[in-house]
Amino acid sequence: VRLSPDPQLTDLFVRYWDNALAPAERDELAARLAADPAARAEFRLLSLEAVAAAEPAPAPVAPVARAGRWSRRRWLGLVGGGVAAGLAGVVVSRRLWWPDAAEPVRLTASVGEVTLKTPGGDVPAGAGPVPADAVVSTVGQSSSAVLRFPDGSAVSLGGESAVTVGGRGRKLNLLRGTATATVPVPAAGAEPLTLGTTEATCSRLGGAVLTLSRTIQATEVGVQTGRASVTDAAGDPLEIVHPGEYLTVRPDGRHRKQPVEPVAEKCDWDLTRPLPEGWEAGKLDAPKGGPPALVPVYRFDPYHQKEMWQIRSDHRWYKGFARLHRQSQVAVTYRADRAGPGQVVFCVRRDDLGSSDTGVVEWTGKYEATGGQWKTLRVTAEDMLDNKHTPKFGAPWVAFLVIFNTYERDLGLRIAGFQVIPPGPAA
Amino acid sequence: MALERDSIVQVLLRERVRVMASASAIVRDVHAADDIFQQVVLAALQAADQFRDPGHVLAWALRAARHRALDLAQRRRLIPLPDEVLDLMEADWADPTGPWSDQAEALHRCLGRVAGPAREVLRLRYADGLTAVAIAGKLRRTADAVYQMLSRTHRALRQCVEHELAHLDQPAEGGVS
């Protein structure tokens, strides 16, 4: 069904929302919706827009400063799939999954800031049992936590991740971030751990080591040892994932299995081509007579609790953008109409897919006003380590997310080139 | 055979936006629609034995959300759309071939491109739940100006979504590698 091209329907909708239609307008709206499938399609899209506009942006950005206490909506919005998804996970865990658990799931290790979200509010998490109705979250890219399950499974949460536990202690729901699970071969008759997100569920994991990664755009499942049987949200089988493979599942069920390739030592963005699927924020602008460039968009940043001008790449846990060594050089070709503070941020993981440890490698400085000229910022990874969430593990680091940020000011920033150059003569 | 409870939850989480949007179209309050969705999840789990398949769960959830939204609309003295229109809308929402996932994904991208005052008005309207009159008071504009801005923004979003959906067949991997 096509959308209605009639702009008056939108005018009616915005006043219908306020209960502000005159009787004749109400009748007109009802008549259009009754008679015209395209008008109903338009009305449905407008309703979807209202819901989507009320949701906070779900993904976090490079951490700089912690904000104060969040509202329930904001907190849950950050937890992956949004408000109700988060709460439904909590509801389900409270009503169904815990009451007859033989042993509790325990938090056995934490690094950095780890919180438990309970009906009573956010509380810092310490080692011990995970309450029945809690969401466990790691705050900041350098935070991590380990959960141990009654069957002996261990799940390590990376930075900026959130999970609930259900299935009487046998199911882990990843709401956001990355979790690496080591699942032992189950005792005879015992049910092994399953891991899932809104899009996908991994089961039959006995003897497996696997990593589950979730963003708003997709779920990725990668297996290091053993294998994982993955089903979609409706429980229909999708794929068996074997060691050295990863499966990407989109919210609409599209999925693709690929081999895990070694991460490249360098990268050089080709902005003459369209941005990849899953690109989160920022747009590509290709003016006549000038090079194509990435331009920031003004978006709500849940970490800073403010709207900011940002470019934010897609999330590539497995493929990565580049492997960063301490002497790797980052070159950003930019133009700015106004000078002002800004960042170039890499969220990084270990160069070992058996770990979900993450951190931040970040340049925080000042973009210069370039007077219409292009300028290249050059900085080594070593010079990007002085930040609160610097990796707690050594190089090489695999960059899986790239962010450009100019905070609340629109500097008229345009990024026409982005390279990671490995150490050596070329650098 | 009845569905497992986990499967019911999976269906409802997957269809959360659809159920919430259907309720918000009646109650005109996204936060109330969110609460209604949560009530529907709990009610669905209590009625778990009756569900035959995922389509059944969705149809049931849409109907349950509609009833709850109408009850709330009545308490708030909102004038609802006629029942026959709501019947048609409910059937449309339940259509398994609808472009819901694609639209939601496209909307997510398009909203990321809404900036400045338009973004602020959307936030005040739908996230903060303010009426056009209240927004006008905050921004020192007239209510009509706010309505016009909302209409323009919705139309821009719709064009953006159409554009995004038209380009769904482009290659998955672009030049940023």
Image (tube, coloured by chain):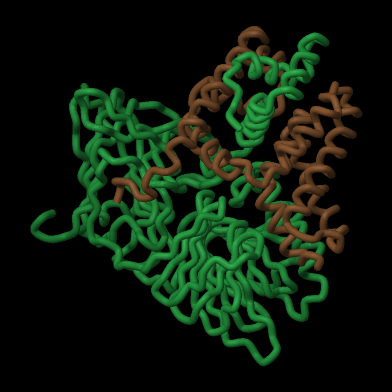
Chain colours: A green, B brown
- Residue A256 image point, x, y percent: 45, 60
Which residue in the rendered view is the most extreme toward the left? A425
Task: Please state which of residues A264 and B67 is positioned toward the viewer in this rendering.
Answer: B67
Question: Can residue B169 be seen by looking at this rendering?
Answer: yes
- Residue at 65% x, 30% y: name it: A41
Left or right relative to A244: residue B129 = right
x%, y% of residue A101? 77, 76
Residue extending furthest toward the bottom: A188
Report the residue at 66% width, 35% height from top.
Answer: A51
**Quarter of the image where the N terminus of chain A is located:** top right
Residue B106 left/right relative to A122: left
Q: Which residue is at the front of the view, A301 or A289?
A: A289
Q: Which residue: 40% across, 56% down?
A: A316
**Image location of residue A236, percent across then percent down:** 62, 65
In this orientation, which residue lies closer to the viewer: A17 or A175? Answer: A17
Taking the image as shown, residue A106 lies to the left or right of residue B103, namely: right
Q: Residue at x 57, y 78 (%)?
A: A205
For residue A76, side relative to residue A98 (left or right) = left
Whole-percent x, y for residue A369 in the image? 25, 26
